[in-house]
Image: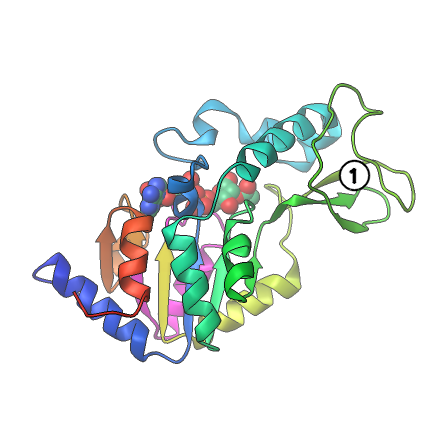
Amino acid sequence: MRHATVEDAIDHARRALAAAERVVVFTGAGVSAESGVPTFRGAGGLWKTFRAEDLATPEAFARDPRLVWEWYGGRRALVAACAPNAAHRAIARFAATRPGVAVITQNVDGLHQRAAHDAGASVLALHGTLFGARCTRCGRRTPHDLPVDATSLDTLPHCDACGALLRPDVVWFGETLDPHVLDAAFDAARSAEVCLVVGTSALVQPAASVATLAARAGAMLVEVNAEATPLSDSADVVLRGRAGEIVPVLLDKGDPV
Ligand code: OAD
């Protein structure tokens, strides 16, 4: 549906979000851009400077674990110095006060979780976390937020249980997502009345299917993004702009604009 004015579009989305019992909030790197975390695609995106196949694949880690840990350690340090922004906080408040809201993110930066922790809400992280590690031999998962010394193979993090090399607990290209997390996300998508999609290029599968599944099952699709995406044409409401400015207007109580 096309709206006569931006105010009409915001009002339509706000009313639908306020009235719905089951809502999915599905986010990507753009929701963290205003916190200072670089996105992957678009202007200033990480994949403009770095090659994903050198850093974010199992083959890259097998070839050069030092390089991959150095990169993830650097991203972890950068993100640790960032704070949740107004969009993360509004989403966390919305989810904490409404039992039928599922927050599903592709982000590994932990900013939704940090905002949610204060508000008491939970988050489905489809692509894992920068602040965790997983053993390459026994598969044991462990929280890991220490600085990474990538000067040699020996200084890289190793498993407390079996001594083998740890790897970042993120999902790389060519890997399957945790089936429990993905099933929970798809279940929430199929039963959502409204799907609010924030700051994702919607190009990476299967994550992007959260939005398309929801729409196919009848959910109203609301997109908040700085640019057009493959979802824009089929979205019921498209709001172009910055997540930190638009999302609080959509989710926080107050007079309709
Ligand atoms: P992308 O970098 O592909 O897309 C970021 C989106 O955010 C773009 O559509 C931008 O237009 C939008 N954007 C940027 N700044 C914004 C702002 N302030 N407010 C609103 N929107 C803004 O990031 P993702 O879609 O999250 O996967 O990427 C998906 C996956 O590809 C990531 O999880 C990661 C990546 O490679 C893996 O590493 C497996």
Q: Amino acid at mark 1?
A: Leu
* Closer to the camera in the image, 68 or 248: 248
Residue at x 81%, y 24% (from the top left corner) = 153
In the picture, measured across the screen, residue 26 lies left or right of residue 256, that is right
Q: Quadrant of residue 33?
A: top left
Q: Is residue 125 left or right of residue 224?
A: right
List the single residue furthest toward the right: 162
**Could you tell me residue 193's position as x and y percent?**
36, 76
Tell me if I can see residue 85 in this picture. Answer: yes
- Ligand 1: image quarter: top left
Q: Which residues are magenta?
A: 199-222
Q: Could you say whether the residue bearing mark 1 is in a helix, strand or loop?
A: strand
The quadrant in which residue 184 appears is bottom right
List the residue tagged with mark 1.
166
Q: Kindly tell me whether residue 203 is visible in this rendering.
A: no
Report the residue at 62% width, 33% height from top: 72
Say which residue appears at 43% left-offset and 59% top-offset: 26
Q: Any magenta on residue 200?
A: yes
Q: Does the residue tagged 1 have its C-beta within 8 Å of any atom of ligand 1?
A: no
Q: Is residue 19 above or below residue 227?
A: below
Q: Where does residue 197 sit, x and y in percent of width and height?
A: 37, 58
| Residue 111 included in the magenta stretch of the image | no
